[in-house]
Amino acid sequence: MAETRDSGVAFCDRLVERFPELRGLLADHRQYHGETLPHVLMGNVTRWAVGEYHDGRREAIAGLADWLEAEYPSASSYVEDLIDDSFLENLPWPPHPEAAAIAQLLGPRLKQSLQDMQKWR
């Protein structure tokens, strides 16, 4: 179990390294929880993405969507679940305009994953 959680923590660290604007989010998260809880943090990243999109900072979200798509094929099953269950599943569902717009920015693998989720919702 620790090995898979460790891969999630490493993924979160790479995410924040790639997107420095998430440093404050990670710092607040670690201060509150005392450690990195990957699934909780990714839910927070989803809320950040929706807020960024709402505030007109779409280029940051497009970059995040591209990065997640690139990470997905080589990800461990834990990290796949992290992206699916804690990022995609936390997107507000249509008719929420930001969620629909963010879904359009996703690459083919993540779009398919989101569509699969919507089938059972």
Image (cartoon, rainbow, N blue to C red):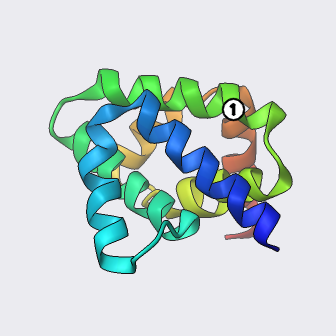
State whether residue 120 appears in this view.
Answer: yes
- Mark 1, Cα crowd under 10 Å, few <14 / some 14-19 / many 20+, is some
Q: Is residue 49 left or right of residue 40?
A: left
State whether residue 95 appears in this view.
Answer: no
Q: Is residue 111 left or right of residue 27?
A: right
The residue closer to the viewer here, 105 or 17, is: 17
Q: How many marks?
A: 1
**Vertical arrangement, residue 61 with respect to residue 45, above or below:** above
Point out the residue furthest to the bottom here: 33
Q: Position of residue 6 (x, y in %)?
A: 70, 60
The image quadrant of residue 61 is top left
Classify the position of the N terminus by image quarter. Answer: bottom right
Q: Which residue is mark 1?
A: 71
Q: Is residue 28 left or right of residue 71?
A: left
Q: Is residue 40 left or right of residue 72?
A: left
Q: Secondary structure at mark 1?
A: helix
Q: Residue at x 33, y 27 (%)?
A: 60
**Looking at numbered disc 1 in the image, what kind of residue is underneath it?**
Glu
The residue closer to the viewer here, 75 or 107, is: 75
Q: Residue at x 51, y 45 (%)?
A: 13
